[in-house]
Amino acid sequence: MKWSPPRRLTGPTTWPGLRRGTARVRFTALYVALFLLSGTALLAITAAVASGGSSDSRVAPGNGADRPATAAQAMGRIDELEQRLVQAHDAQTAQILTGSALALGVMAVVSVGLGWFVAGRVLRPLRVMTAATRRITADSLHERLAIAGPGDEVKDLADTIDGLLGRLEASFDAQRLFVANASHELRTPLTTMRASVDVALAKPGPVPGITATLAARIRAELDQVDRLLEGFLVLARTQHGEFDDSRLLLLGRTARTALAARAEDIATRGLTVRADRIDESARVWGSHTLLRRVADNVIDNAIIHNDSGGWIEVTVLAEEGKGNDHGAVSLVVESGGPVLDQRRVADLARPFRRLGADRTGTGRGSGLGLSIVAAIAEAHHGTLDLRARPEGGLRVAVVLPHPGDGAPKVPGTETDVTR
């Protein structure tokens, strides 16, 4: 299939003077310009007709030289009356043209308001479609514009967008279903292979060294594939919005729990951890399992992609909002390491994106950690911000909405999050 270059729209609305501003402003300017052109043309025609009548009226009927001398005084009086009539006609014509010009100016001003009103009425269905389309996200592709009205161009456009949304919904569902089914189906052969390796090593008698080495390597690779499949499942589940374990979570305590669970890895790599800015009372509302996965992934990322003997700083802060805005809770994890390119750091939030084969050469990680964090943050109406530190290393900030004082309190929440 050959793709042709995009066609450029042509017409009055693309003229240089009308390219700036909204469509309503351009339509209003177009309406006013057309009104002025038509009014000016009508005024010119009126002036031409009036001037023609005036010139015709200047011609005196007959020839005074052929009349008798006794009628000379009468003809002089007639000529004088005709001249006065012509002057009155010219004055009336000038008055009409002046009044018409003033009326044209007044109506030009009025046409701006009328044009603005008419343009708004014409564009109202498009504004409705735009607002409805903005409300539709990847999690609400089942919604449709469903614009009612006659079968005009606007209705055709709305139906076309609804058809596109239907195809996108089917594509997203097929993708998520494939990932989920493939991940589930692959777990069975992985479990079988892991069991076979364990059985081979558990047989009586000495195990050759090369066999033990190969078995350990295979077991490590199987664990890596298992983590990859688990990441696929979490990513598909998050993107589909399938979680029903929402409750209040103390994000600060969750971060401390994640650090404590990785104390051995931190000690092995000789990392220094600074965690004196963790507000353990900072609360967020959402999936308990997925939000704990956020803390685990960002801290794992800081440990894996770090220099030996480096450092990690974990911060959890709650910021109060104003009015209807309840504020936000941020989890920030900064780590040392090599200097990174900020233009490529943003790609780390996409699946299987790394800065090179591996940022530090550790050979660990599936390439899904930060993409899972981004998907979970988006599902909870939050954001993920990745920044390369000028001195080297990475700053990962997860910002989630604060539940506010009116959030429901689930019994046992504070106990559960510290387990």
Image (spheres, rainbow, N blue to C red):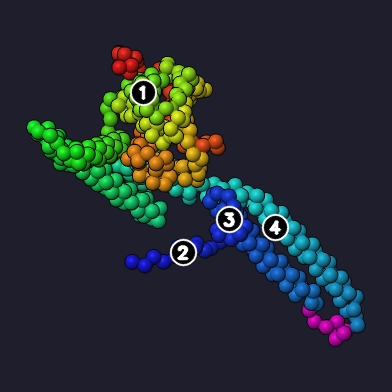
Cα separation, mark 2 vs mark 3, equals: 17 Å
- The residue beneath circle 1 is 263
Q: Is residue 328 visible?
A: no
**Amino acid identity at mark 2:** Arg
The reply to whether dot 1 and dot 4 touch (C-beta < 8 Å) is no
Q: Is residue 213 above or below residue 105?
A: above
Residue 283 point in image, percent of width and height: 40, 20
The reply to whether dot 4 and dot 3 touch (C-beta < 8 Å) is no
Instruction: Write down the region rendered in magenta.
Output: 61-68
Cα separation, mark 4 vs mark 2, equals: 43 Å
The reply to whether dot 2 and dot 3 touch (C-beta < 8 Å) is no
Residue 81 point in image, percent of width and height: 84, 69
Dot 4 or dot 2: first in sequence order is 2
Which one is in front in this view, the residue at disc 4 or the one at disc 2?
2
Element assignment for label 4: helix
- The residue beneath circle 3 is 19
Q: In the drawing, does residue 87 fall left or right of residue 137?
A: right
Dot 1 or dot 3: first in sequence order is 3
The main secondary structure of the magenta stretch is loop
- The residue beneath circle 4 is 100
Which one is in front in this view, the residue at disc 1 or the one at disc 4?
1
Q: In the drawing, does residue 4 fall left or right of residue 225?
A: right
Element assignment for label 3: loop
44 vs 240, nearest the viewer: 240
Which one is in front in this view, the residue at disc 1 or the one at disc 3?
1
Which one is in front in this view, the residue at disc 1 or the one at disc 2?
1
Residue 102 point in image, percent of width and height: 71, 54
Write the residue at 70% across / 69% down: 48
